[in-house]
Amino acid sequence: MNPFEELEVDIILSGKCCYCGACGAFCKYIHYENERPVAENCEHCGVCYDVCPVNYFSESKAEIEIFGEKRKDDAIGYYREILAGRATDENIRSKAQDGGAVTAILTYLLESGAIDSAVVTGRDESWNPKPIVAISKEDLLASTGSKYTQCLVLLGVKDAIKMGKKSIALVGLPCHVKAIRNAQMSGHSLGAEKVSVVLGLFCMETFSRDLLKHKLEEIGVKIEDVEKFDIKKGKLMAWVKGEVKTIPLKELKDAVRTSCKFCNDFTAEFADISFGSVGSDDGWSTIIIRSDRGEKIVKGAVDQGYLEVQPITEKGIEAIRKLASRKKSCKVVYTQI
Ligand SMILES: Cc1cc2nc3c(=O)[nH]c(=O)nc-3n(C[C@H](O)[C@H](O)[C@H](O)COP(=O)(O)OP(=O)(O)OC[C@H]3O[C@@H](n4cnc5c(N)ncnc54)[C@H](O)[C@@H]3O)c2cc1C
Ligand code: SF4
Ligand code: SF4
Ligand code: SF4
């Protein structure tokens, strides 16, 4: 078997592929059909096998390489500080999912010249997510908000590199974060070091976009009419023409992507900075500062007036820890060392 065939047997055909886009980002022979990677004319180099975050991820190696030391918190992972934050710009806040901290920080990084692009997730009218290479504040504002379906985010890194970008920020779910870290640590010459900032989002699960569309139709909602989605208090909330329609998460179990059932990372443990809503008040984003680079970025964004921060309560941290532990305890953990 060639390395791609091994990936097919171990990951893709067994329903564990999280559809991150890493294999296709770093191999010209791989494309995607029906939410699956497909390879033609494989040259047996092994890159796809090595970068796939479901196939392999070394937590201890990543912690030493990124943070210089190992975690003290089993559930949340390595971190320096946890804060609540929000954009100072009201326009960002009005379009953002929570406090707009992600978009405020990316705006600061772009406008200060610390990065030349950011790979974010946009969407079409039918909520099909797509990776975008943002090079301006306008691009960032067009891609705020959470899409609760899976995106081939790593293909955005391929596009950014093709565009000649040299200092790229990546915003991704925990699986995307692991994928870029694998590519950076793989020893293959892939250009992944051009991703200089990794921002992670908390994630419990994503839905199959088609099954989500179907579930919404059952409650009389056309996905094209949804202005915003959120998940709060055990419910998926969809804003439609000023009204909020809800579906209990337990009724959406069948729509959850199979691969998410194998994932044990809630807080994007290997990002420079992680963001979520749990732990903070409405209108604020929770910010977990993990790396030295992440610490400097948050300080810079605050000093330059892009971001305001406030302490988070112990109760807030406990809420994050509880969800992170729950995700670890009910997942099948394999090839994670
Ligand atoms: C699928 C998903 C599940 C989540 N689950 C939880 C949860 O269980 N608990 C919790 O506390 N928080 C969760 N979050 C995080 C939360 O919804 C917010 O993203 C976070 O609080 C940051 O808010 P913000 O206002 O700072 O972000 P914004 O400033 O609005 O920026 C949002 C960023 O997220 C990116 N993005 C949107 N959708 C995706 C996607 N599908 N894949 C990759 N990037 C994407 C956008 O490109 C944008 O850069 C989830 C997010 C997503 C996308
Ligand atoms: S050429 Fe390399 S990366 Fe591409 S499919 Fe084959 S083994 Fe995988
Ligand atoms: S690298 Fe990502 S898209 Fe490719 S097989 Fe692995 S999980 Fe799936
Ligand atoms: S639960 Fe894990 S595998 Fe599923 S989308 Fe979230 S981070 Fe990716």
Image (cartoon, helix red, strand yellow):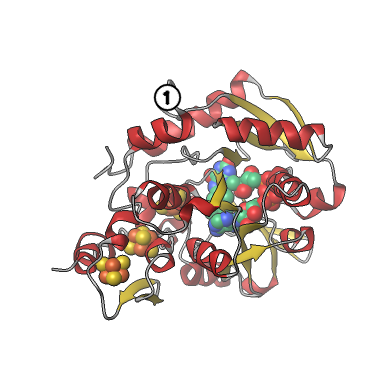
Residue 16 % position (x, y):
30, 58
- Decide: is 213 above or below 274: below
- Decide: is 190 above or below 263: below
Q: Is residue 306 visible?
A: yes
Residue name at image x 40 percent, y 72 percent: 35
Give 72 or 158, whichever is nearer the viewer.
158
Residue 103 % position (x, y):
72, 50
- Amino acid bearing label 1: Glu
Give 203 or 40, whichever is nearer the viewer.
40
Quadrant location, the C terminus: top left
Residue name at image x 73 percent, y 38 percent: 282
- Decide: is 76 above or below 197: above
- Decide: is 31 above or below 231: below
Residue 14 % position (x, y):
24, 62
Quadrant location, the N terminus: bottom left
Rate crowding at label 1 as few (under 14), some (14 to 19) or many (20 or more) other CA atoms within 10 Å: few
Is residue 118 shown left or right of residue 176?
Answer: right
Q: Which residue is mark 1?
A: 69
Query: Which image quadrant shows ligand 3?
Result: bottom left
- The answer to which quarter of the image holds residue 156 is bottom right
Is residue 15 shown left or right of residue 93?
Answer: left
